[in-house]
Image (spheres, helix red, strand yellow):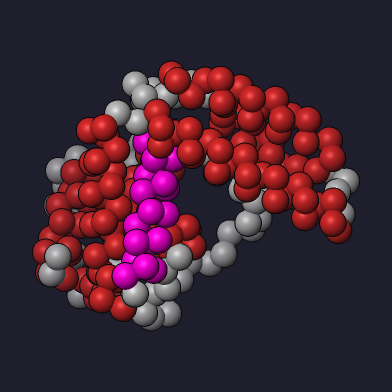
Amino acid sequence: MEVAEYCRQVESYLCQKNAGHLIRIVGPAFEQVCGWAEQGVPLALAFKGIDQYCERYYAKGLRRRPVRIEFCEADILELFDDWRRAVGVTASGALSAEPPRRPSLAAHIERVIARLAVPRNSPNAASLDPVVAGAMEELDGLLGDAKHARGDKRSALISRLGEIDRQLIDAGVVALDASTSASLRREAESELTPFAGRMSRDAHQTAVDAAFRRLVRESLGLPSVSFE
């Protein structure tokens, strides 16, 4: 996608989020959005970052002014940083979000358990119930150790969280119907298009697979169990 078209789509989406109120992306804001396009920020992540900011803004009550794209940058860049770490690609420039403060290991596990307990709306999620129930039971057992784990014990616990995460996503991949799986695979390939020219074939395929698994997680409403 050309940079100008990328900016037009971001502008159109921002207009929708502002109930049709037109906010032109010009001047410094245009340069800002061009920077996202040049960095390879997937359009879907830009939209998600706008969504996140708008959700917080509207939750405060009656809005006093339209949301401008500049307000959404921190959310977008944080999502992009998370995405790059997940799929294993690097940005070509220096754009980066401020690193979020990481919760304690015990707090992370508590949040994961709480998110796993939330019913999932996806029609593909029903078959995951036994796997999710097993993960919640194990995580509940690990929670006590997480509060005091140090050294090798902490490292082993973090390693186990990664294994649980992989098991959940593996089960999620199996649970998807063929149409949804193919659609997510195409989306993953599209996300990596800006980076394909500077990656080896094997590295690109690995990144696409990682992006696909991230999309499976989002599609099924599964939290990240891994602690990074």
Say which residue appears at 42% left-offset and 47% top-offset: 214
Q: Is residue 143 left or right of residue 54?
A: right
Q: Quadrant of the C terminus?
A: bottom right
User: Residue 3's quadrant in the figure?
Assistant: bottom left
For this rendering, which residue is in front, 25 or 41? 41
**Looking at the image, residue 119 lies above or below residue 36:** above
Secondary structure character of the magenta stretch overall = helix
Residue extending farthest bottom: 93
Q: Which residue is at 57% across, 26% downward?
A: 132
Q: Quick check: 111 above or below 226?
A: above
Nearer to us in this view, 202 or 127: 202
Residue 204 lies in the magenta-colored region = yes
Q: Residue at x 44, y 33 (%)?
A: 172
Position of the N terminus, as image quadrant, is bottom left
Q: What residue is shown at x 37% (from left), y 36% (from top)?
A: 219
**Range covered by the magenta-colored residues:** 201-220
Is the residue 8 above or below the residue 92 in the image? above
Q: Position of residue 25 (x, y in %)?
A: 19, 65
Q: Residue reaching furthest front?
A: 202
Horizontal side of 150 relative to 180 (left or right) equals right
Q: Quadrant of residue 100?
A: bottom right
